[in-house]
Amino acid sequence: MYSSYSQFQQFQLASQPYQDTQRTWLAVYAPGRCTALAYSMELQLHRKFRLTDSLDALPDGLDGVVLAAEDGECLSTTLSYFAAALQGGADFAFCDAVFGFEGDTLVYRAADRPQGCKCAVLSRELLQRCRAAARDPDDPASLLCLAAGLARHPVHIPQALLRYRRQPHAGDIFSAHGKRALLLSHVLDMTGAPIVLVSAVPVLLQMGYEVAVLGPGDSGSLGLFVEAGATAVTHPDCVNSSMLWDLAISSDLVIANTIVEVKAIRALNGAPVPVLWWLHDAFVGYGYLSHLIPRTLERNIRVCAVGSHATAAMHTHRPDFEIGQLVYGLPDYAQDTFSPYDIGYAGGLPLFVSVGAFEMRKGQDVLVEAIRLLPASTRAKAAFLFVGKGADKRLLAQVRQLAEEYPRNVFYVERLTRDEIKSLMDQCACTVCSSRDDPMPTFVTEGLIFGKPGIVSEHTGTAGLITEGVDGFVYHSDSPSQLAEAMAKLIDHPGLAARMAPACRALYQRYYSKQAFADTLREQIQALLAQTSENEA
């Protein structure tokens, strides 16, 4: 039995607690073909249940009914979880599921969005209300759809308790009615592109879309999508999977995130679905993919980018593409409650902060040289913190050498938690982005949220939005001396950064706030739908 579960189910099963649910009596109703379901019922740890082929004249004392609209396999703990949900006061409980012969496709349902679920438990009272309202009171699919809307106390069980030996289709993810939006992300980690894609979910929900995101396995950000209200579907080969086409053409809108989704763009170019291609990529991101970019794009595809730098990166390869501007939005972290991060090591000196993985395009070596170029008296009046994983060992060695030379002024931390980053931005004096190629560095935006000016290279998307000396500074030609000069202005004029704070907040509100992003995303979607409609006409 255990070996028939997918690897993910085995992983979850190992951490599942024992639940005493034997006092809760369930019926299991699956009037269609239910060979696999019936077999897995024999292996249930929860034993107080009965299979039934009729919902009429249910016996007294029955607490709830498990409805199955399709044959599938249950974990040995499925009924225990369903019964526990009823014991906890739920009148409708649904769960996650795995799909495919290997169980390598996972569907994580949003806590308040049971659309498309093929199996769930209903309390007896809810079942009666659904049957009274249903056209066909014996059809599990109809009853499940009604239950999703009529339930007063629905519960989502974040466990893959069910398995279907087929790939999922749109009906497993979306409801039969309403608009559908599918988000495509080649990674679901905590890097910038997937994190800012999460911001699109509440906007799309407000526009009346049901939202699903398709990506590989979870590497940190999947939970953010689900918490925002999206259903998440994961497949190891999400960029090339045939499932992508099936889900996309069953949707009303597709948002493809970054240049890495270029294969999806090729597949959907000219397809009967509007596609918004949102570019966040640096020039280096096109290295192995530029030859895949279509020479022309059909009217169903609209390209947007996070500022002038990302636009220029695409125009290097396809100069004729029309590219709209869609700058990401970030929540107002200044309104959050977070634990303080101790920057006592700075000794009360104004702290200049650089955040990012150590790689040549991030230019940590430029900042190292700029700090060395500062006059000794100026350098002694400030502290400098590098935060980031040392992927490039040579760059990391340069930073560590600098910290050894100036132990009271230069510091390095490999990583910080999200709360620590927020607290750091709240306390620092200035952010410094010395990148040679960076579309729109998020840590600079996070600094703006807290009213902190940024010093940025001209090779960043932020540079095109800054008003020099008002809400930040821009240096040119990857020049360490120019960067040193900009830092010296803030160090030698202690009150300058504080005086810039209102303008920095205004810059955030104007371009990066949730409202600004929502307004721009709506405009771009409406423009996409309009051009698609013109093409159909």
Image (cartoon, rainbow, N blue to C red):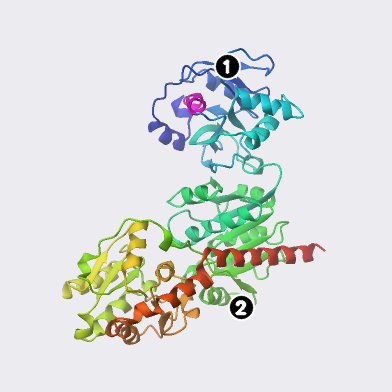
Residue of label 1: 62
Q: Looking at the picture, tell me which residue is in the foreground, 370 or 126.
A: 126
Q: Is residue 491 magenta?
A: no
Drawn side of residue 336 relative to residue 345, left or right: right
Confirm whether residue 286 shows in the render.
no
Residues shaded magenta: 77-88
Residue 322 falls in image quadrant: bottom right
Q: Residue 388 in the image: x percent, y percent?
A: 32, 64
Amino acid carrying label 2: it is: Pro
Residue neighbourhood size for the residue with mark 1, other residues' Cα within 10 Å, grouped as few (<14), some (14–19), many (≥20): some
Q: Which mark is residue 319?
A: 2
Please, what is the dominant secondary structure of the magenta stretch? helix
Residue neighbourhood size for the residue with mark 2, other residues' Cα within 10 Å, grouped as few (<14), some (14–19), many (≥20): few
Q: Indicate whether 49 appears above or below 225.
A: above
Residue occupying image coordinates x 21% and y 65%: 344
Q: Looking at the picture, tell me which residue is in the foreground, 378 or 89.
A: 89
Q: Of helix, strand and loop, which one carries label 1?
A: loop
Q: Indicate whether 274 appears above or below 376.
A: above
Sequence-first disc among 2 and 1: 1
Amino acid carrying label 1: it is: Leu
Drawn side of residue 450 relative to residue 258, left or right: left
Drawn side of residue 338 relative to residue 45, left or right: left
